[in-house]
Amino acid sequence: MKRFYKAVSVGTADRGYQVLLDGRAVKTVGARPQVAPTLALAEAMAAEWAEQGEELSTAAFLLRDLADFAIDVVAPDRPRAIAELLPYSETDTLCYRAEPDEPLAARQREVWEPLLQQAEARFGVRFVRVAGIIHRPQPAETRARLAAELEVRDAFALAALRNTAALTASLILGLAALEPAAELDTLWAASNLEENWQIEQWGEDHQAAARQERRRAAYIAAARFAALARESGPA
């Protein structure tokens, strides 16, 4: 699609801010007002539009797409959005390890165990560690506590979490990415521990590396989206 606007700006809206293209407010895919909760997020979304060339690249609208998902999908049905996130806690990457005597298991204990223990301390829960791929359910108290954690998140945070949890196959790493002091590179490396282990053993596949970099960019963008959505606007 060719660029159809010249000027990009940000205006105030009811309960937030909107991106304006030639003075006209942008709407979501679902034709709802695309209102960002903070000026910081609206300005970042405006930058996506301003940085476009003569041909629009839809792949560059990472923040816009997350905002649309928050407004069109999550906000109208938060219970469903939460229900779709909870299964990541049942199959969390950090909980499923190689057999204890395998070399990979030692790496998993070194990298994953501190992150898992931090989550246990933060949420006051216990996670079951599993050797192998046979599913074992997490304690009911753990599932309930994580559900309560999701309940207090707004639509924009839940939209970001949908990406951070899915991309890491981990609700623990997904939630950690939304923390203000999150070390995103460390968290992303942890989620790719097994893939990186295979690279160490057999060498790198360039197509796989490119795919991982695209996924990493999406993970970083989702964490940034959540951070911008919670920043304070002007007094």
Image (cartoon, rainbow, N blue to C red):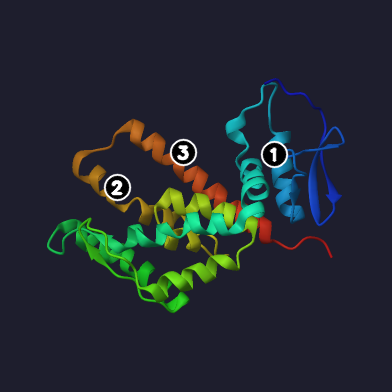
SS assignment at label 1? loop
Q: Amino acid at mark 3?
A: Arg
Q: Are marks 2 and 1 in contact (CB under 8 Å)?
A: no
Q: Mark 3 packing: few (<14 Cα in 10 Å), some, or many (20+)?
A: few
Residue receiving disc 3: 214
> Residue 203 or 121: which is nearer the viewer?
121
Q: Nearer the viewer, residue 25 or 38?
A: 25
10 Å neighbourhood of mark 1: few (<14), some, or many (≥20)? few
What's the residue type where badge 1 is placed?
Gly
What is the spatial separation of the Cα atoms under label 2 and label 3, in whole angstroms? 15 Å
Q: Amino acid at mark 2?
A: Asn
Please give left or right for residue 32 compared with residue 202 in the image: right
Q: Secondary structure at mark 2?
A: helix
According to the image, label 1 marks what residue?
Answer: 30
Residue drawn at point x = 31 percent, y = 66 percent = 137
Discs 3/1, front: 1
What residue lies at 36% left-to-right and 69% top-to-bottom? Answer: 116
Q: Earlier in the sequence, mark 3 or mark 1?
A: 1
Give coordinates of residue 90: x percent, y percent. Answer: 36, 61
Figure quadrant of the C terminus: bottom right
In the image, is 225 to the left or to the right of 219?
A: right
Name the residue tied to disc 2: 196
